[in-house]
Image (tube, rainbow, N blue to C red):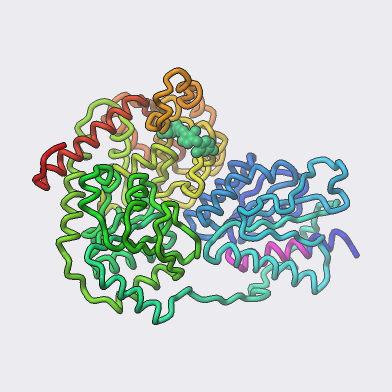
């Protein structure tokens, strides 16, 4: 059999089937073994190729594209350590339920474990962090094998996009020569019809299960709804309608997308992280039912408080996971979340316990008043940087926040408002790696994107800036530079004065204006809030990459947070008419 003919027919059919199944974006990294697939992707007019030299950044770039497009994205790299560099992004995609098709080229079996160059064990490389691993066959050109490559492709896309979404790894052993016949490739394209279609349905509960849950809800006088990151846009409306019918407060994580947008916020509570730390307030708000959607929210105070509750605790998850780090769940409800909300709305009367919601709202408003005092601060601080950023973001823009302090600051300071801001973060595995690339991915398919990131996380993925330069991303980076890792100053090791800076603070003294120069970014180190506001607002009218650096102080950050917490408690005591502690 002619080798080139087989290579061309088998791999062109695979690429064609990817397109037919809705995959239109591929992030390619350079290499030799992946040559035929790279060329065939380039030859297919339906495919958009993003080239990223560093596979670690490439993996996260694909993740960002998939997050923002809400569609599966493919990755392609050569054999050897290139494949291992995808690992962190694959882990994040698995934990955050993002669909990726990870395509790795490999040497054929006869060149495995014999000291061939650039050859490592790629079989099941990502272990339990992919939904499926598929070892492809050596290319052959016959009806059976061409159908095989198409159906295996369809199955891979289906696996990646079936709840829970996630990455699928396909390893392609390829023999030399590696150049396909580009003139022939078109003959295996534009099939238009899927080789095989896969039909599946929405996960729903039986009528008796719905009635039993409705009964549990009906009995509750003090229910709450807790929302972590929500995967689907229809959830916003479903949950707000459900909450209004029940009259329950909704404790909404910034990634739930429920804090911003043009809909009613009457049930949304956003300051819980600040007020649940206070024992008296936490006791006052004990619920008799918890209904939780999405992963556990960012707030540690909320997680610890939920852990103490003795009430029934329902976790609704259409992805059928076990999202219960506080070990508080009493019932896992495996049902499509939107379906759950609407099915139960039909079974439940309007809630009459208005006092319960009013109490939550009163406390939330008091906390918000105290937190907003930060707006009057003159000194540069991380807290006010986040408040101003969210105040000044344009309508219909995207805000990407890094780990670990930026997402926590946002949790405290992102208040409800009608301006629509889509909030993103890498909270699957909470890494400080790959954040720049993921944000670049989001920015390439969105109008205005802002990334708020700490200096260590920025340093970790500076290579990610190349894609921003090459693809003219419209991205504003707010770089909060406290010269090291701010989160550790809040942890018990902060008392280990002697070793703290070396092991945890980790100051680096880098001058990031040089980074900006290297990647051709517009750069501004701001010294006042008026300078920040002006640079930030201007950044939206300038195309390309903009970096606005704010230098802050880690210890000052801890002091400010403590001061604000006291202020929150004082304000709550005042509105509740209780003695100040
Ligand atoms: N390495 C990875 C890949 N991920 C991690 N989450 C960590 C290490 C542990 N870690 C969590 S937060 C953090 C580190 C090292 C410091 C982050 O510092 P920075 O990005 O400057 O943000 P800050 O906390 O100062 O706001």
Q: Is residue 314 left or right of residue 134?
A: left
- Highlighted magenta segment, given as a residue range: 10-22
**Farthest-out residue, front:** 310
Q: Residue at x 56, y 46 (%)?
A: 60
Q: Is residue 213 left or right of residue 223?
A: right
Give above or below for 499 relative to 177: above
- Front-most of residues 131 and 65: 131
Residue 195 quadrant: bottom right
Q: Position of residue 85 (x, y in %)?
A: 65, 42
Q: Quadrant of the N terminus?
A: bottom right
Q: Is residue 129 magenta?
A: no
- Front-most of residues 214 and 298: 214
Q: Residue at x 41, y 28 (%)?
A: 481
> Could one spot residue 158 in this view of the protein?
yes
Q: Position of residue 48 (x, y in %)?
A: 59, 55
- Front-most of residues 177 and 204: 204
Q: Residue at x 62, y 56 (%)?
A: 130
Q: Quadrant of the C terminus?
A: top left
Q: Position of residue 499 (x, y in %)?
A: 48, 20
Q: Is residue 457 left or right of residue 124?
A: left
Q: Main secondary structure of the magenta part?
A: helix
Give above or below for 174 relative to 468: below
Q: Is residue 251 left or right of residue 139?
A: left
Q: Is residue 19 magenta?
A: yes
**Farthest-out residue, top:** 498
**Farthest-out residue, bottom:** 207
Residue 274 quadrant: top left
- Front-most of residues 17 and 5: 17
């Amino acid at each position: 059999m002619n080798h080139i003919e087989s290579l061309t027919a088998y791999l062109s059919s695979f690429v064609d089937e990817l397109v037919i199944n809705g995959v239109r974006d591929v992030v390619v990294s350079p290499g030799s073994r992946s040559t035929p697939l790279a060329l065939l992707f380039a030859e297919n007019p339906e495919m958009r190729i993003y080239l990223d030299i560093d596979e670690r950044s490439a993996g996260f770039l694909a993740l960002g594209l998939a997050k923002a497009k809400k569609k599966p994205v493919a990755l392609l790299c050569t054999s050897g350590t290139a494949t291992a560099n995808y690992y962190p992004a694959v882990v994040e995609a698995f934990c955050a339920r993002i669909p990726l098709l990870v395509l790795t080229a490999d040497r054929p079996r006869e060149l495995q474990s014999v000291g061939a160059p650039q050859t490592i064990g790629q079989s099941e490389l990502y272990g339990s962090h992919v939904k499926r691993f598929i070892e492809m066959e050596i290319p052959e050109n016959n009806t059976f094998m061409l159908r095989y490559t198409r159906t295996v492709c369809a199955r891979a896309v289906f696996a990646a996009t079936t709840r829970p979404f996630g990455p699928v790894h396909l390893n392609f052993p390829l023999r030399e020569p590696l150049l396909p016949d580009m003139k022939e490739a078109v003959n295996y394209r534009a099939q238009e019809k899927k080789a095989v279609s896969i039909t599946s349905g929405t996960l729903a509960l039986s009528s008796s299960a719905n009635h039993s849950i409705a009964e549990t809800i009906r009995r509750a006088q003090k229910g709450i709804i807790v929302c972590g990151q929500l995967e689907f846009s229809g959830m916003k409306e479903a949950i707000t309608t459900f909450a209004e019918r029940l009259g329950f407060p909704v404790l909404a994580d910034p990634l739930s997308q429920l804090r911003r947008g043009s809909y009613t916020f009457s049930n949304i509570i956003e300051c819980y992280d600040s007020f649940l730390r206070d024992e008296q307030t936490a006791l006052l708000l004990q619920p008799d039912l918890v209904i939780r959607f999405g992963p556990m929210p960012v707030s540690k105070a909320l997680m610890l408080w939920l852990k103490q509750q003795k009430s029934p605790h329902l976790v609704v998850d259409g992805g059928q996971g076990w999202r219960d780090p506080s070990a508080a769940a009493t019932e896992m409800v495996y049902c499509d979340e939107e379906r759950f909300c609407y099915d139960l709305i039909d079974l439940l009367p309007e809630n009459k316990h208005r006092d319960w919601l009013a109490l939550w709202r009163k406390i939330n408003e008091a906390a918000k008043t105290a937190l907003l005092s930060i707006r009057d601060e003159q000194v540069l601080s991380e807290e006010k940087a986040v408040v101003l950023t969210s105040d000044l973001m344009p309508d219909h823009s995207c805000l990407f926040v890094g780990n670990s302090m930026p997402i926590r600051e946002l949790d405290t300071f992102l208040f409800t408002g009608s301006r629509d801001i889509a909030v993103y973060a890498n909270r699957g595995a909470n890494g400080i790696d790959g954040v720049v690339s993921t944000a670049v991915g989001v920015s390439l398919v969105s109008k205005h994107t802002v990334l708020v990131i700490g200096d260590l996380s920025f340093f970790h993925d500076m290579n990610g800036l190349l894609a921003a330069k090459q693809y003219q991303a419209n991205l504003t980076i707010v770089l909060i530079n406290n010269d090291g890792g701010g989160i550790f100053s809040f942890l018990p090791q902060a008392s280990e004065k002697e070793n703290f800076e070396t092991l945890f603070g980790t100051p680096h003294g880098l001058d990031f204006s040089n980074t900006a120069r290297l990647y051709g970014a517009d750069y501004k180190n701001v010294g006042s809030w008026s300078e920040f506001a002006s640079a930030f607002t201007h950044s939206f009218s300038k195309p390309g990459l903009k970096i606005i650096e704010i230098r802050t102080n880690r210890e000052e950050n801890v002091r400010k947070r403590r001061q604000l917490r006291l202020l929150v408690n004082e304000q709550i005591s005042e509105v509740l008419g209780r003695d100040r502690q």
